[in-house]
Amino acid sequence: MQLHFSPSMRSITISSSSNGFVDLMKIKVAARHISYRTLFHTILILAFLLPFVFILTAVVTLEGVNKCSSFDCLGRRLGPKLLGRGDNSGQRLVKDFYKVLNQVSTEEIPDGLKLPESFSQLVSEMRNKKYSTKEFALIMKGMMERSEREIRESKFSELMNKHFAASSIPKGIHCLSLRLTDEYSSNAHARRQLPSPELLPMLSNNSYYHFIVSTDNILAASVVVTSAVQSFLKPEKIVFHVITDKKTYAGMHSWFALNPVSRAIVEVKGVHQFDWLTRENVPVLEAVENHNSIRNYYHGNHIAGANLSEITPRIFASKLQARSPKYISLLNHLRIYLPELFPNLDKVVFLDDDIVVQRDLSPLWEIDLGGKVNGAVETCKGDDEWVMSKRFRNYFNFSHPLIAKNLNPDECAWAYGMNIFDLRAWRRTNIRSTYHAWLKENLKSNLTMWKLGTLPPALIAFKGHVQAIDPYWHMLGLGYQNNTKIENVQKAAVIHYNGQSKPWLQIGFEHLRPFWSKYVSYSNEFISNCHILE
């Protein structure tokens, strides 16, 4: 940039050469007298502004704009940019791309379209084949749909594998049962009477706290009993009635005979030892166990007939859980016969085998059930939106006319697993006959009224006979979601590993397992030799 002053100081010429062309600016000074200070300041301002003008000129040139030989041309081209009103070619490009995407979204992927296997391959093909916008959009759609299918298939495969793992018997637990059964046949001490003869009257003494556990899992039963005894303020007042099936009886008896629980009373009894459990008294359960379609439903192909393209993994997981073979086991239905199996008892607490007791449960006997039969925690209220959001609509098919006529889909459900049963009040009801009647109806309808285990018929049979108790007494969900808050687990009186991820399985949640495993005696000879959870 050059400044030229006329000899008379009447004019000033400013010139600059950029990219081969010359810009000139000539300033004429008025004839009247102006001070040198004013002139000097004017020159400084122009010297400061002009470099920016030339820089903008270079930018425009680099962007491919036609050369401008005057400030007027430059102003017309730079003005909109400086004012934020540049051309909208970029916006038009985006709109055109959106238009193509909308068009492609309704089109099917051509059968002959070969999709890249990776992003790097896509980039390479874009360089070589010069895809049009529509071709690119179709390829991206095809790749995304393929990825979605693979992810869904992988998720369903994971759920199936988890279902099989949950339904199987771990090697260590099977080993424990076999070794203890062998011990029962060879060791007289393992066959000793439980409880000892002098304690037999306590089995029907209603001043004691009577617990009932029905299970064929020896290890799980030992944890339930041990955790309850260690948590009780007066363990000498506890009586445990452990009921098991015929094949597990010898091993279960051996365990509690060889590992007596300090101060507490434990009775082990097989279903074959109850005189009341005859075919005449439980005809429906025999039908459930022997019905071919029922057995196929629980033991057959769980994928057949399922439209995986129209079902979410979460719903599929619930359906798999409903098809657990344990739901057709007599042990799982025994709780409906408690008044007949224990005719001399007034009040009992029934515990599932996948729970852990963390507090003294003696206050449960002081809860006023208001003449109701079943004290249970409701599962439609609570902070956990998954675990504590269960209503009748979650268990029943309300498109079935009998269900729609007799039940309310918004009625709150309650939980099995830790229940207070007033057996005296129960004996004055028709709960058992109602349970049997609805089981028969569901069998007639080919399981179209409900699918999930033993709770749905119990929800109907106990309708009007349930007293809600504080959720503190029974925390659910530790077996099917891993985001359970540890602080909530620590506060609960009873924690329940309901779901597939039982703590004795490898698929159990590692951060929740210690609340259960701390009651396992790993130093015990039989447990250590069977390498349980190693």
Image: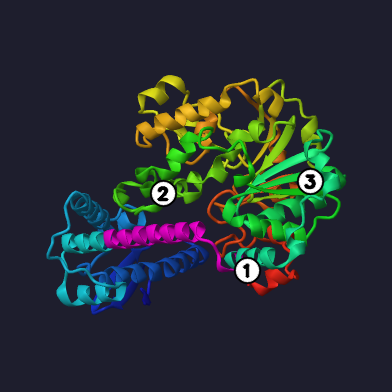
x and y percent of residue 486 in the render?
68, 53
Q: Amino acid at mark 1?
A: Leu
**What is the C-alpha distance between the residues marked 3 and 1?**
26 Å
Among the 4 quarters of the image, the one containing residue 363: top right
Main SS of the magenta part reads helix
Q: Is residue 233 visible?
A: no
Circle 3 crowding by C-alpha within 10 Å: few under 14, some 14–19, many from 20: some
Classify residue 8 as left or right of residue 218: left
Q: Nearer the viewer, residue 336 or 482?
A: 336
Q: Amino acid at mark 3?
A: Arg
Report the residue at 60% width, 53% height from top: 216
Q: Who comes first in sequence, dot 1 or dot 2? A: 2
Q: Secondary structure at mark 3?
A: loop
Please state the extent of the stretch shown in magenta in the rendering.
144-173
Pointer 2: what residue?
298
Pointer 1: what residue?
533
Q: Nearer the viewer, residue 318 or 403?
A: 403
Circle 1/circle 2 CB separation < 8 Å: no
Circle 2/circle 3 CB separation < 8 Å: no
Q: Nearer the viewer, residue 533 or 182?
A: 182
* Residue 69 sits above or below residue 386 on the image: below
| Closer to viewer: mark 2 or mark 3 | 2
Pointer 3: what residue?
359
**What is the C-alpha distance between the residues marked 2 and 3?**
36 Å
x and y percent of residue 30 in the render?
38, 59
| Closer to viewer: mark 3 or mark 1 | 1
* Residue 442 sits above or below residue 262 on the image: above
Q: Is residue 278 visible?
A: yes
